[in-house]
Image (cartoon, helix red, strand yellow):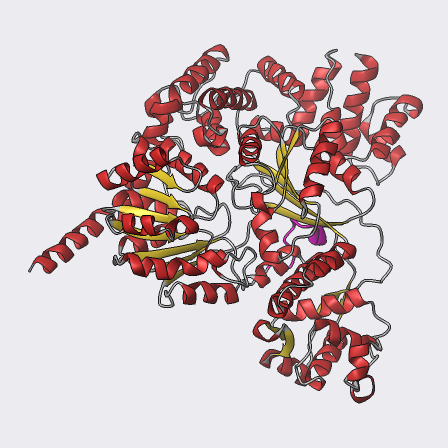
Amino acid sequence: MVLFAFQLKETCILMIIKGKELSEHLKLHFGFDSFKGNQEAIITSVLEQKDTFVLMPTGGGKSLCYQLPSLLMDGTAVVISPLIALMKNQVDAMRSFSTEEGVAHFMNSSLTKQAIENVKSDVLSGKTKLLYVAPESLTKEENVAFFKQVKISFYAIDEAHCISEWGHDFRPEYRRIRPIITSIGQKASIIALTATATPKVQHDIQKNLGMTEACVFKSSFNRPNLYYEVRPKTDNVEKDIIKYIKSQEGKSGIIYCLSRKKVEELAEMLRVNGINALAYHAGMDSSTRSGNQDSFLLEKVEVIVATIAFGMGIDKPDVRYVIHYDIPKSLEGYYQETGRAGRDGGEGQCIAFYSNKDLQKLEKFMQGKPLAEQEIGKQLLQETAGYAESSVCRRKVLLHYFGEEYKECNCGNCDNCLNPKKQVEGKELLCTVLETIIALKEKFKTEHVIDVVMGNETSDVKSYGHDEEIETFGEGKDESERTWQNVIQQAMISGYISKDIENYGVLKVTKAGKDFLNKPKSFIVAKESEEDEEVEEVQIKGGGSCAVDPELFAILKDLRKKLSKKLELPPFVIFQDPSLEAMATTYPVTIEELQNIPGVGAGKAKKFGEEFVKVIRTHVQENEIVRPEDMRVRSVANKSKLKVSIVQAIDRKVELDVLAESKGLDFSELLDEIEAIVYSGTKININYFLVQIMDDDRIDDIFSYFKDEAESDDIETAINELGSDYTEEEIRLVRIKFLSEMGN
């Protein structure tokens, strides 16, 4: 009877928090109006006390999947997390949303004895809904004894890929989690979460945690706002990085290096060249390391140069670029690290520098390790090299690696799609590859297959007699190695070839591949020569911008920075960029209006809101702004006022396309306004925008035309004289520069 009553109670609880009520809790606690993706389904699964496995890319909102249920369920949720820095960030974030200081705690080796006792007291009293622990802390006898006294609502295993030796950040201590949970002895469900997991790693995680029957939720790994580019690593790589960072003034970025020595050297080089940068690696003492991280989070420095030790410890939504000085050891690691960019949905540029020499170095580092570990490491490296050298859409390759099909032909946001290689009919090339794999009895890896096709008489090829026994030997000698790599990679993505990971990565022909052999059809592939042409810099693309009041947005950002300094909190903990953008669009002038802003909520509005609404109120009054709250239709801006605001925005170096959008103008209409300003005698400087979109030579050519050749400033005449290589927009922009510099 008692058991039935308990079950009935649990059912009632679930009825209360499901459906519309659940979204009300989301709004109340976190300030969001709706869930992202499958967050709601995941949270419901946790609330129903089911084992739950979550695959969700960085920035997809994984943390909320255990944070919200922890607040709604009886007891304390135990979150197992690998890094102290990550725990601290999470706890700070939770406390910012709640008025109860003890709602979240972490327990690890960085705490004093007294601090640990305070944490335990809060947990036992029922104040704490989320307790973050390191796997090492979980295994200590005294902590196991403590957890036996605690009502545990559920376990959350963050960064669950650490369990698998096939994952990019394998940690043996993660293998002990399941036995420890069993020894604690409470019947509590598990939610395992990761941002990177291949099908192999997923299976490994579920098996090790004893949750093979878990509800699995897999979100798309596609991050449309991220731009992917691989550049050749030359002797000028430092110069290239400095040039790039200086073109991204005011934006936060992370640079990853493989060695601690290189981290220190590169950070120093950036500082010498006037870039505010700090280093971060595991060899630094903890106070310096955490101090440097805080400086980055608090926007005291723009750039952090780091080893992968920084990978999971950073939770900054507005990182605008991630640069890999060295190619990573695995595609999972690469995806995880690039995922630190653009977490707020805004611009995120991911640039990797690649050299085959770096690959050889990494292979040497593996020597001396157990043979099985070496083999796994080599396979992971080969996947990374395949990605770096591929001419196929970067997004397509990445998503295929994680078991996801990307159906678009051109993503429009990677270097290969923006600057495509020559496409040729590859039907015969694919047939040659398929025939070779079958002739080799599906027992060899990519490199060997290519060696046979190209007729390379390597020691392995000769020892197996494949130079004499295989009919296709040397059939592809007229094509480059890169072309054959592209054929194999494209065939894997198309489902004609599979890679047997369990068996050292040997290639196998699928049923679809055999059908193709019987009845070949069109197969388009990128064709390249060995003499790699110098890679042209393609126009970098990123996430979109919001139509906001740029002046107010800048004011709010500055206020947030001052407040973060005062409170010693990262700026994004106070309010994230999308929340500031919403404020600069809707102009909330009371606390009640502020708490309706996405990502704010009642707790944050009360904690941090007063100064923000005061600033917004002043801005609205001084600029005579008609708010959307006051009037449904926004009034057309006063012409003279519009011109003043354009001049002010250009003085602040607001990008012109962003400025046009914020004013509700087409780009051409904005140029009309700027031209009128210049013609009236006002001097303005748009060089900051010009250098981003045009080469210096092109600017000089147009400028010289107006200075030395033109008889008038007529655009039509200029177009005819300069030729079709130059667009009307480019000519108008340089004419503005010319008129301002020479005439005003």
The percent position of residue 503, horizontal first and vertical second, equals: 60, 76
Which residue ends up furthest to the left in the rendered image?
1
Q: Residue at x 64, y 68 (%)?
A: 375
Q: Is residue 112 left or right of residue 188?
A: right
- Of 21 and 215, nearer the camera is 215
On the question of residue 231 being in view, the answer is yes
The percent position of residue 582, horizontal first and vertical second, equals: 46, 30
Q: Residue at x 47, y 19 (%)?
A: 566
190 relative to 597, above or below: below
- Of 184 and 393, nearer the camera is 184
> Would you identify the image quadrant in which residue 743 lies?
top right
Q: Does the magenta run of residues contain 557?
A: no
Location of the C terminus by quadrant is top right
Q: How many marks?
A: 0
Which residue ends up furthest to the right in the rendered image?
708
Q: Residue at x 59, y 81 (%)?
A: 511
Q: Does the magenta run of residues contain 416?
A: yes
Magenta segment boundaries in residue numbering: 408-417
> Would you identify the image quadrant in which residue 638 lies?
top right
- Of 78 and 317, nearer the camera is 78
Q: Residue at x 47, y 59 (%)?
A: 163
On the question of residue 390 being in view, the answer is no
The percent position of residue 61, horizontal first and vertical second, equals: 44, 46
Q: Is residue 514 left or right of residue 18?
A: right
Location of the N terminus by quadrant is bottom left
Please tell me whether the stretch drawn in magenta is mainly helix, strand or loop.
loop
Q: Is residue 719 left or right of residue 11?
A: right
The percent position of residue 272, horizontal first and vertical second, equals: 75, 28
